[in-house]
Image (cartoon, rainbow, N blue to C red):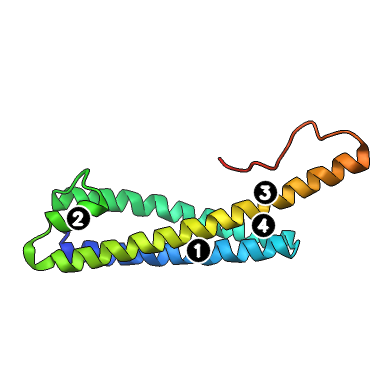
Amino acid sequence: METTFETYFDFLGRLGHTLEQLTELARQKSLAVRNDDLAAVNDCMKQEQVISLSLRGMEAKREKMLTELGLEGVPLSGLSARCPEELRARAREVSAQLRSKYNVYTSAADVARNTLECNLHEIEKMLTETTGDPPERTFADIRA
């Protein structure tokens, strides 16, 4: 099956929906951390792992679609310039929506990470106060 631009636009819409799911999970994780609900944090992380695996598959499919469209290496921001004239407005709209959803997701993920790091700092501080010794290993910076 040959990929059309409309098929690719639909795919980008599904990708945007996946980003919305990740955004909601990041918000749930932040709330769970603030509520000291370790089970909920763990559940959110498991769901994020599942979505992460699906994103890997989506990335492979996206690359294949771009190849079929002759757009290998073209960033999302350059999509509209490479589309047929009659599809450029739609390409700009789809690209802008996806970029917006990505920005919302990264903001929510940053909040979740910072909230988790703050709580880990508090745990380390309490351990140090309780034992008199700082932990041998710190956990407060969770960035990979």
Q: Left or right of 87: which side holds 19?
A: right
Q: Left or right of 17: which side holds 124?
A: right
For marks 1 and 4, give the CA distance.
16 Å
Q: Residue at x 14, y 64 (%)?
A: 88
Picture quarter with the C terminus? top right
Q: In this view, does 12 lie above or below 73?
A: below
Q: Which residue lies furthest to the left in this view?
A: 85
What amino acid type should be assigned to the residue bearing mark 1?
A: Thr
The answer, for residue 2, to whether it is visible in the render is no
Q: Residue at x 76, y 61 (%)?
A: 36
Does label 1 or label 3 sit earlier along the sequence? 1
Within 10 Å of the Cα at label 4, are there few (<14), some (14-19), or many (20+) other Cα atoms?
few
For marks 3 and 2, give the CA distance.
37 Å
Q: What element carries label 1?
A: helix
Within 10 Å of the Cα at label 1, are there few (<14), some (14-19), or many (20+) other Cα atoms?
many
Q: Is mark 2 on a helix, strand or loop?
A: helix
Q: Which residue is drawn at 75% across and 33% down?
A: 137
Per the image, the residue denoted by label 2 is: 79
Place residue 8 in its image quadrant. Answer: bottom left
The answer, for residue 41, to whether it is visible in the render is yes
Per the image, the residue denoted by label 4 is: 42
| Disc 1 versus disc 3: nearer the observer | 3
What amino acid type should be assigned to the residue bearing mark 2?
A: Leu
Q: Which residue is drawn at 50% across and 63% down?
A: 23
Residue 23: image tag: 1
